[in-house]
Amino acid sequence: MLVLNDDQVMLQDAARGFVSEKAPVAALRKIRDEKIADGFDRGLWRSMAEMGWTGVLVPEDQGGLGFGFVGAGVICEEMGRTLTASPFLSTAMMAATALSRAGSPAQKERWLPAIVAGEAVIATAVDEGRRHDPAGTAMRAERHGNGFRLSGTKAYVVDGQAADAVLVAARTAGSAGETGGFSLFLVETATRGLSAERLSTLDSRGAAELTFDGVEVTADAVVGEVDDGFPLLEIVLGAGRAGLAAELSGNAQESFDRTMAYLRERKQFGRTIGAFQALQHRAAHLFCEVEVARSAVLAALQALDADPAGASLAVSVAKSKASSVARLAAQEAVQMHGGIGMTDAIDIGLFMKRMQVASTLYGDADFHADRVARARGF
Ligand SMILES: Cc1cc2nc3c(=O)[nH]c(=O)nc-3n(C[C@H](O)[C@H](O)[C@H](O)COP(=O)(O)OP(=O)(O)OC[C@H]3O[C@@H](n4cnc5c(N)ncnc54)[C@H](O)[C@@H]3O)c2cc1C
């Protein structure tokens, strides 16, 4: 059923209150204008940990809340409404998913309590070029003594500039284009040979290009199965894609709400512009699209809770729909605000910039529409 249960509604209310008070859009402007190197506020991240958000996907027997993907998505949606910058997606969703499902006992003991406490940031490094292409991974992890030696570059690693460790996808066999031969490694960012170059991003958040120059790790760094890591990577990416889709749903909803408020306030030709039928039609169309996107997102989050390995179709539907609807919402918001919509004086442009990044990350609307078409045999 595509509705939230009572616990999820309470979490939504708490998240909405928290981000509107502690992380309004002005907080993102501060990160941008003061060039805060982490790309997020560490004090805010600790407050999120106190709220329990960092453990939302960590099982209760491992110290978390075990609230599941719907709960995580509810938080993402609310953060999307205020453009909250935080490592929630990279750390509390993607890394927590990888480690709680496939981490060794030692990895779980080392990292899960640190994630829950808000003391560890863990990035995921997959893509090596401009486009999202996990199967295209070429980075090598050569066997070296008892462990591996990693060499290669990861192009756009969310939170890579602030991370304590990075979950990196590399080839222990096969070649670019194949889904066999993948292994995932958890590498501390202080390891010799690993360097990060912070990127200047459109959405003012943190991301880095990571270079692995003969980085040596022991076999203990492997997360999951050697040579057969692609299914786990898909689940980790599924968590990231669903989180982004939920965030984009919140981004679209907020763009819509702000635009509706403006249509009721702005007067031209002696009337509020919302009285013009041309704009009413556009607003009605956008309302319907935002509702459809939210339903697709909730279906994906529920599918992940039911069976993370079997949720990829629902996740791709959600990521595709939420990406295209958030784009429509941003474009309509700018247009319906008239000339002021493209200025920095109001926040609408910031929603558009974040939409541009979040809709592209881990596969854009076309990437995921293509996956849906292939899965359906088109
Ligand atoms: C890059 C840029 C440069 C500019 N440079 C100049 C300049 O050099 N000199 C200058 O004087 N101005 C300039 N402008 C301002 C520009 O002329 C106005 O932005 C434009 O005329 C629209 O007016 P507005 O911004 O007040 O929007 P509004 O009139 O408030 O429009 C808001 C929304 O309502 C819609 N709308 C308005 N009336 C109706 C209607 N009757 N029926 C249906 N829909 C309606 C509009 O299409 C829009 O979507 C510039 C704007 C931009 C973006």
Image: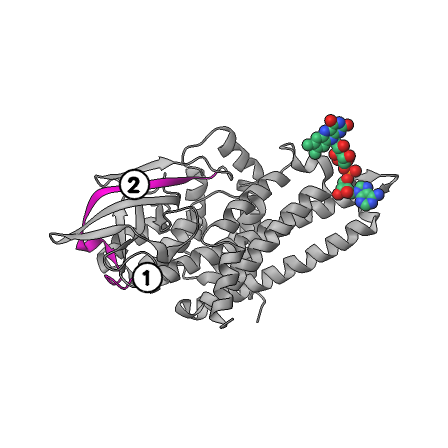
Q: Name the residue carrying label 1.
A: 178
In the picture as drawn, the residue positioned furthest to the left comes out as 145
Q: Residue 139 versus residue 91: which sits nearer the camera?
A: 139
Secondary structure of the residue carrying numbered label 1: loop
Q: How is the image coloured?
A: one colour
Mark 2 C-beta to ligand 1 under 8 Å:
no
Label disc, if present, on residue 211 of the rendered structure: 2
Residue 160 visible (yes or no): yes
Along the viewing direction, whichever of 32 and 369 lies nearer the viewer: 369
Q: Is residue 25 left or right of residue 113?
A: right
Residue 286 in the image: above or below residue 4:
above
Residue type indicated by callout 2: Thr
**Residue 211 counted in the magenta span:** yes
Q: Residues within 10 Å of mark 2 (few under 14, many from 20)?
A: some
The residue range painted magenta reads 205-229
Residue 116 x, y percent position in the rendering:
36, 51
Residue drawn where x is 45% and y is 66% of the image = 312
Dot 2: element = strand
- Residue 41 sits above or below residue 51 on the image: above
Q: Please name whichever residue, 71 or 152, is drawn nearer the observer in this view of the structure.
A: 152
Horizontal arrangement in the rendering, residue 35 relative to residue 350 (left or right):
left
Q: Is mark 1 within 8 Å of ligand 1?
A: no
Mark 1 crowd level (few <14, some 14–19, many ≥20, 10 Å Cα): some
| 363 on left or right of 94 | right
Quadrant for the N terminus in the image: bottom right
